[in-house]
Amino acid sequence: LTFTVQGCGKVGSTVAKELVRLGAKHVQTCDLFPQAAEIKGCTQIHDWANTSCDFLVPCANSLAITEEVASNFPEGIKFCVGATNSPFANEKAKGIFDKRGVMHIPESISSAGAILADSVEWSNINLYQTVEPAKMYGWIRDISREKASDLAAHAGKEPQYVESNLKNVVPSRDGAPVGKDFEKWIEEHSSTTETLIVGGGLAGTATAFSLAEKGIRSILIEQASSLSPPTASSSGDSRMYRKMYSSEFFSKMAAQALERWGDVEKKSGKKLLQENGLLFYGEDTGETVEGSVLGAKEVMEKLNLPHKYYATGDEIADAYPALESCRGKPYSGVYEETAGHIRASKACEAMAEGAGDKCNVKLNSKIVSLDNQGEGGKVVAVTEDGETITADSAVVCAGAWTNKVLESANLPQLNLEVWQVQWAHFEVANDVAASIPQAFHFRKENDIDGGLYYVFPSSATESVQNGGKSFVKVGVDFRTGEALTDMSSFNYEGSQEVLKMIDEWVKEHLPSVGERLDSYCHPYTMTEDSYFVMDKVADNVAVFSGGSGRAFKFGPLLGDCMASLLTGEQAPVDLAPFSATRAAVSSNLNKARQPVVAYLDTLGA
């Protein structure tokens, strides 16, 4: 469906944002002040009366739908439901829409919020004065949606029968006001659990999986319409897994995580990991967020992990014909045969499914308040839809939205950056695709070019395989533009300049690859030292954040770590390096900073 929101003031802009949040793919916005219609995820139009849509949402001036507008509105319109009082200039204009088969739900049903709120005030003044606003909004939305659906059903979805059926959905003036039902609605929309998990990406689903193994119930809420949504950082076909690190600590963690991924695969019955090897190659860059070629070689040797070393660019070109451009260059390389890729979105789904009935997943559910000082030391959360969730403890796994959730709980925020990171798919001939390895290329930074590029083979691009064609995924591991502090100005379009660099890298390093099919820009939540945050920020609230582009491979192991913070059991890895009180991430948490920093120095990463 295509929606046109006419008028983007406080009400109209909220409607447009909600449509996008709930999964609408085509939302058009129009306003007399063009800047008001610039809403993320929406397409701005300049003439709402002459732009086709399925669903017209009037949220502006009254009487805007004149006889002329109703007669000439483009074909295909099916519904007219909005917040405007008296959207039709006269009964004749409304009659024209009726004859055209446009279902109109009167604003007395679709936009009766003020009257409903007054009804609560009339029936229970104390509740009206003390209730969390989100609960009131949720009830109003719920009752408006219910009444609108009932009216359409009573009218047989025939526009000419709407008015005559209003009596079937509007309560009688006799008896108590409708607001009397609000308190009961709050009770019906309240739930309890042992653990509330905020965020349905890698860390959230992994935590749910680990808690379920321990018999601990959880409710997982995700603000988007799916787990690992495309607007966040855990979605897609592929993430690398490897033991090839410049840090012994992370290399050993990766080995532990692989065992736990085996448990997830066994429980879910799904193949999530595919071994296809990984090549690190390029210049001697020194250590980067992804390590380095020589650093990885040193750790692989020290831990006695199987690998192959290439001392020159010529040796790399001989081993990988697709990388012929390495010939003659001052490159070296390390290959780990047992590395591969994880099916990212499917992995998150598998962990949530693996949690079974111990985890209740709630999609399209956005936290607006989080109180960790509820009665009896409980955590009490309220969602945008007015639902109240009471839990013994909470785990915040909200990625780039972490600080927004912490702020809602009046908890100290963390020193996190949000990076805009880009990647794309490129078409490649089937015979060539087989020769392209999964690889990470290191070269020295040059202005906005951060020097870190990667390629996933065609076996890691399942979602775009079509018509017998093959595609590879190529991306960068450096940010587009300046680092952000939140998602308010995130640009999912990315930068054309960075896309040009990706295109040029492909032409230089993979000359047999064809044209770019698409492009994406996803958020990476980064810490200053590239270590995650896995810690408690209150006695009953734990946080995972700052995945720094390297967290996915550790998935279920991270879930085990988060579960241990709640249960008090021994964590499977030393959590000291991931403390929320270390100097690199602590803004208002001041405990034991220097000992943690000194400890990190001993890890050599």
Image: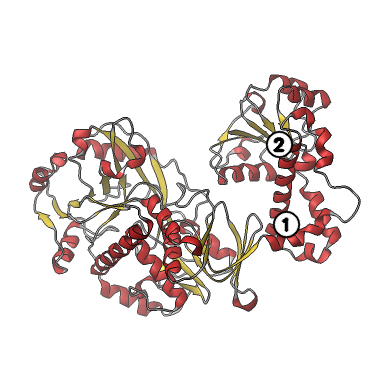
Does residue 463 appear to the left or right of 112 in the view shown?
Answer: left
- Determine which quarter of the picture holds residue 32: top right
Q: Quadrant of the N terminus?
A: top right
Q: Is residue 571 visible?
A: yes
Name the residue at 82% across, 49% down: 115
Q: Is residue 512 visible?
A: no
Name the residue at 27% across, 45% down: 456
Which residue extends farthest right? 174
Q: Which residue is mark 2?
A: 81
Badge 2: residue crowd in 10 Å (few <14, some 14–19, many ≥20) = many
Mark 1 lies on a secondary structure that is: helix
Does residue 305 appear to the left or right of 476 in the view shown?
Answer: left
Q: Which residue is mark 1?
A: 136
What amino acid does circle 1 point to?
A: Met
Q: Position of residue 61 (x, y in %)?
A: 75, 35
Does residue 346 appear to the left or right of 472 in the view shown?
Answer: right
- Determine which quarter of the picture holds residue 424: top left
Q: Position of residue 466 (x, y in %)?
A: 33, 33
Does residue 194 appear to the left or right of 281 in the view shown?
Answer: right
Disc 2/disc 1 C-alpha distance (Å): 21 Å
Report the colour scheme.
secondary structure
What amino acid does circle 2 point to?
A: Val
Q: How many marks?
A: 2
Name the residue at 64% across, 26% down: 47
Mark 2 lies on a secondary structure that is: loop
Q: Position of residue 367 (x, y in %)?
A: 58, 59
